[in-house]
Image (cartoon, rainbow, N blue to C red):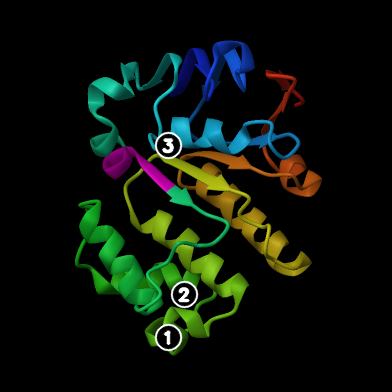
Amino acid sequence: MLTVKDLGYWYDQQENSLFENVNLSFSSGASYAIVGQSGSGKTTFLSLIAGLDKPKAGTISWENQAINKIGLTNYRQKHVAIVFQSYNLLTYMSPLNNLLTAMAITKSEHRGDKEFAKKMLRQLGITDEQMTKNVQKLSGGQQQRVAIARTMCCDAQIVVADEPTGNLDEQNTEDVIRLFQEIAHQQGKCVIIVTHESEVAASCDHAYRLAHHVFTAEK
């Protein structure tokens, strides 16, 4: 379980905080949406639980161990997979090599297993021909599928996604929503999605709205 206790963050002065005294828990096998207006602090919150930034107050713990004790680099490599709106793929590589590289960097139990990586890509609708092309030759929806496949190839139990459907059309959005639900419910991972899209939030098991510096449960 991922927990945040008395979490707070601000840029300059505490009285201008994005949020304070946040207490939330996120369980494996479930999906969560974080919603709110632009500038409310959603992405900042995601960066904190992903270990990309440090909170100004409070603690973040994974399996009852504070992530700063685990070490943020170690925490990110072993426990967190991130899906960005801009995909963040290695643009000079093929989809297959993107997965193999991620598996090697994170020391996945499947590292070096090319057939496993191919299987993951096929499951997400990437053909054998597409998986060996330069990733930039794929459509936006296909690149996002590759980014999601990358999370499925690594051992991380926490999957965080920042506006993962922001660049996608309706059909690809529906496909990506389904894939995240499969990652949560079939792979037993903790999936946390920052989104401004109501249909994405509605598809998640739980949703929290960040407004006026406070998180409120919506479902």
Q: Report helix, strand or loop for mark 2.
A: helix
Q: Horizontal placement of 175 versus 149: left or right?
A: right
- The picture places residue 118, in percent across and down from the top left corner, at 36, 74
User: Is residue 21 in view from this perspective?
Assistant: no
Q: In which quarter of the image is residue 121?
A: bottom left
Mark 2 near mark 1, Cβ–Cβ under 8 Å? yes
Question: Sequence-wise, which precedes: disc 1 or disc 3?
Answer: 3
Quarter occupied by residue 192: top right
Quadrant that contains the N terminus: top left
| C-alpha distance separating marks 2 and 1 | 7 Å
Secondary structure state at the residue bearing disc 3: loop
Q: In this view, does 72 lie to the left or right of 148?
A: left
Q: In x, y percent, where is residue 126?
A: 50, 78
Choose between 26 and 6: the one closer to the eye. Answer: 6
Pinpoint residue 88: horizontal percent, then vertical percent: 45, 62
Residue 58 to residue 136: above or below:
above
Looking at the picture, which amino acid does disc 1 mark? Asp
- Whether 151 is among the magenta residues is no
- At a point 20% along the width and 52% down the height, the residue shown is 107
Give the amino acid at mark 3: Ala
Residue 50's disc number: 3
**What residue is rendered at 63% in x and 50% in y?**
163
Compared with 65, 28 (above or below) is below
**Residue position marked by numbered label 2 in the rendering:** 122
Q: What stretch is highlighted in magenta?
A: 76-81
Mark 3: few/some/many CA within 10 Å (<14, 14-19, 20+): many
The amino acid pointed to by label 2 is Arg
Q: Residue 128 carries which label?
A: 1
Number of numbered discs visible in the structure rendering: 3
